[in-house]
Image: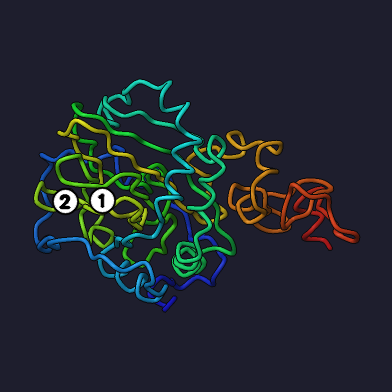
Amino acid sequence: MLDRFRRAAAPGVPPVMRPFREVARSTYHYSMDETVADGADAPVASIVHLAADASVAEVVEILARSGAVIIDGLFGPDDLQRVYGELRPHLDAAAPAGGDFFGHATKGIPGALAKAPAFATFVVHPLLLGVADEVLLPAATTYQLQISTAQEVWAGGADQPLHRDEQVYGPVLDYGPDAPQYVLGVIVAGTDFTRANGATRVAPGSHAWPEDRRPAPDDAVPAEMTAGSAMIYFGRTVHGAAVNTTNGPRMAFIFGYSVGWLRQEENLLVECPPDIVAALPERVQQLVGYQAYSPILGWAAERDLELLTRPAPPGQVWPASVATVIAS
């Protein structure tokens, strides 16, 4: 199964990065009036839905083909209510805003994991971690959380520009057809997602597009799903929220995973300092970033490399420099 995500480099070795002069993309998002590349494949009609008891293999198979998949009913009403309850003071204090990128009608709550410890239920779900293992570990030895946020979208505003999450890294990474996946995104529906309330638009198959292809309006379809369902998608898959035309809000709990050698989009070590993260499960602490990627990357003196919130175990040697490790 992993072969579909592998490249020639050995597992755990970061792909060769591009020089900045090799500019692959000049903006973070695509304009819908840009020209579509000649010979573009016909868009996929809809996003595949799987049941909550789907296997990791089934999910990965759909992802490899379509770049996105919806898992129906992955989380129950109690899971959603716990997170909602912990985020409620922050939502009540926020006003719809977000600027051009978020459509001017979004209550955005960054650092959701720090503000709502129950958010941890989402990020350590066994199915999601199993999929992350299959998708990200061919290019890394560990992975981490990329972001944790809640977005409540209200009526009005504008469509979010279609974009790829990996574009935050600009032209540095290799995005070619043989490149591995660096980011795996997840959107948990806190409310039903419908066309009317602005369900996220997704361009199925866009993870495999040539780099110069830009989306046409008909490429994107709404990711309609019921509350508690989750959409899993590659960081290379084109997507963007739509306008909410109803009287009620649409809630999205958004997070993702990225290869452990890559800088996180959200600085989760600042959002979740040691005094806050200590109350979370150890696996969540590791995902936040309190785990060294290797003995010479991300270490901290006298701290356990596997969990940096713990003192180093007896006999562990931490490097004073890379040279120390190389010489040993």
| Circle 2: residue type | Ala
Badge number at residue 220: 2
User: Do the residues under discs 2 and 1 have CB atoms within 8 angstroms?
Assistant: yes
- Judging from the image, what secondary structure is the residue with disc 1 in? loop
Q: Within 10 Å of the Cα at label 2, are there few (<14), some (14-19), or many (20+) other Cα atoms? A: many
Badge number at residue 103: none
Instruction: Give residue 46's quadrant in the image.
Output: bottom left
- Earlier in the chain: of badge 2 and badge 1, it is 2
> Total label count?
2
Left or right of residue 299, residue 324 in this image: right
In this view, the residue in front, 223 or 183, is 223
Residue 71 screen position, x and y as percent: 33, 62
Q: Locate the C terminus by quadrant.
A: bottom right
Residue occupying the point 33% across, 56% down: 229
Left or right of residue 48, residue 20 in this image: right
> Is 242 above or below relative to 40?
above
In this view, the residue in front, 139 or 269, is 269
Q: Locate the N terminus by quadrant.
A: bottom left
| Circle 1: residue type | Val
Mark 1 = which residue?
238
> Is 174 above or below relative to 22?
below
Residue occupying the point 61% across, 34% down: 270
Left or right of residue 197, residue 91 in this image: right
Which residue is most to the right?
314
